[in-house]
Amino acid sequence: MTHPKIQIALYGTTGHQITRQLANHPRAEIRGICGFEVPPESCAHVRVYPDLEAVLSDPEVQLVSVCAPRKDEQGPLVIKCLEAGKHVYAEKPCCMDEEVLDRIIAASRLMGMRFHEMGGTALMQPYATLRDIVRSGVLGRVIQVTGQKSYLWTEWRPKDERIDGGLALQAGVYLTRFVEHVAGEKIASIQLRETQLGNEIPNSDCRRAVSLLMTLENGGIASGVANYCCPARKFPEPWGYESLIIFGEKGFVEALDGGQSGRLLLEGREPQRLDFSGSDQDLFELFLDEIEQNKTLVPYSLEEEIRPTRWVIRAKRGY
């Protein structure tokens, strides 16, 4: 039996809007767009909504992909969509205030509508493999986690952090996802340090680098760096650079350069090269499954899913 395609409205373009992901998609299609300065060619024949209210008034729209113009204003818009009976897929950070984060969770539960923040780091390779290794218990208890996330520095980075969330909430959140979703350990406290060194653009508050130091509920520790210091790299090499190392009582596991290489080192065994070509899961595809089947399929709760964002928000507030 063929099911009708899920109807999706795209709101805003600040961040990673899912326009390309929906091209010729077998299960979902773009119903309309809103807030696009120049509609992409693939959206030339879809409706253009004048504002978010028009999006929410369309009974055919089932899911809204939200990449709001300003991330400090995105949270209330997400809540508005949920309260209008729409599922929501929101660019990170979904909001920049912890109280608003709690309201998003409450609105999702109250309205029975599904919400996910764009991500799914732990479900994709190479991190799905690392997650499975940690969960197998071969490392013993996790003692330390260290991660890196680097991107290219360009002058088009927003001068105002409130537009895209800033470096900590755009790239630094991967570091807290590494800890909670891949290493499987809950953060107990967090500290953040950041610098604008190297940003010579007038009136710009964009940070070039941030460092996070975390303690874990199990007594372990974690740290990570995120920066706009990665040199330009040619295709097909990754646009940025990232790494993750998880140290346990019995050895450690690592994925370097976005999974270009990886090893598992355990006591009394030869180092094992890791193959990251195994299966993984795309969060957006799981989201569509959840809508079609009306059940939760993402392997962690909504609270667990956005805890990494919560911790970076707290770090920025000096929690």
Image (spheres, grey):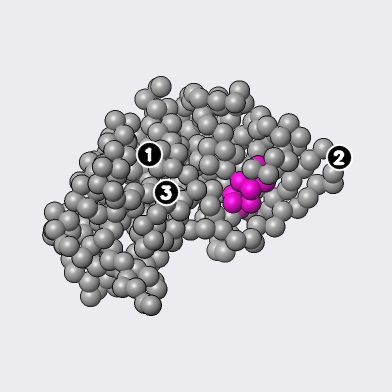
Q: Mark 3, residues whose alpha carbon is within 10 Å: few (<14), some, or many (≥20)? A: few
As rendered, which of 1 and 131 lies closer to the eye?
1
Q: Nearer the viewer, mark 2 or mark 3?
A: 2
- Up the image or down, 52 lies above or below 226; here it is below
Displayed quadrant of residue 158: top left
Magenta span: predominant SS is helix
Say left or right for 54 vs 127.
left
Label 2 and label 3: CA atoms lie apart by 46 Å
Residue at (29, 30) in percent of width and height: 99
Q: Which residues are magenta?
A: 126-134
Of marks 1 and 3, which one's residue comes earlier in the chain? Answer: 3
- Who's the residue at 69% across and 50% down the image? 262
Q: Secondary structure at mark 1?
A: helix
Q: Which residue is mark 2?
A: 268
Q: Earlier in the sequence, mark 2 or mark 3?
A: 3
Q: Position of residue 281 (x, y in %)?
A: 52, 58
Give the quarter of the image for residue 101. Answer: top left
Q: Residue type at mark 3: give it.
A: Thr
Q: Nearer the viewer, residue 94 or 81?
A: 81
Residue at the spot of label 3 = 154
Q: CA distance from mark 2 to mark 1?
A: 44 Å
Closer to the camera in the image, 292 or 282: 292
Pick the front one: 134 or 176: 134
Eye-nearest disc, 1 or 3: 1
Quadrant assignment for the N terminus: bottom left
Dot label at residue 166? 1
**Position above or below: 201 against 30:** above
Q: Quadrant of the C terminus?
A: top left
Q: Position of residue 62 (x, y in %)?
A: 26, 60
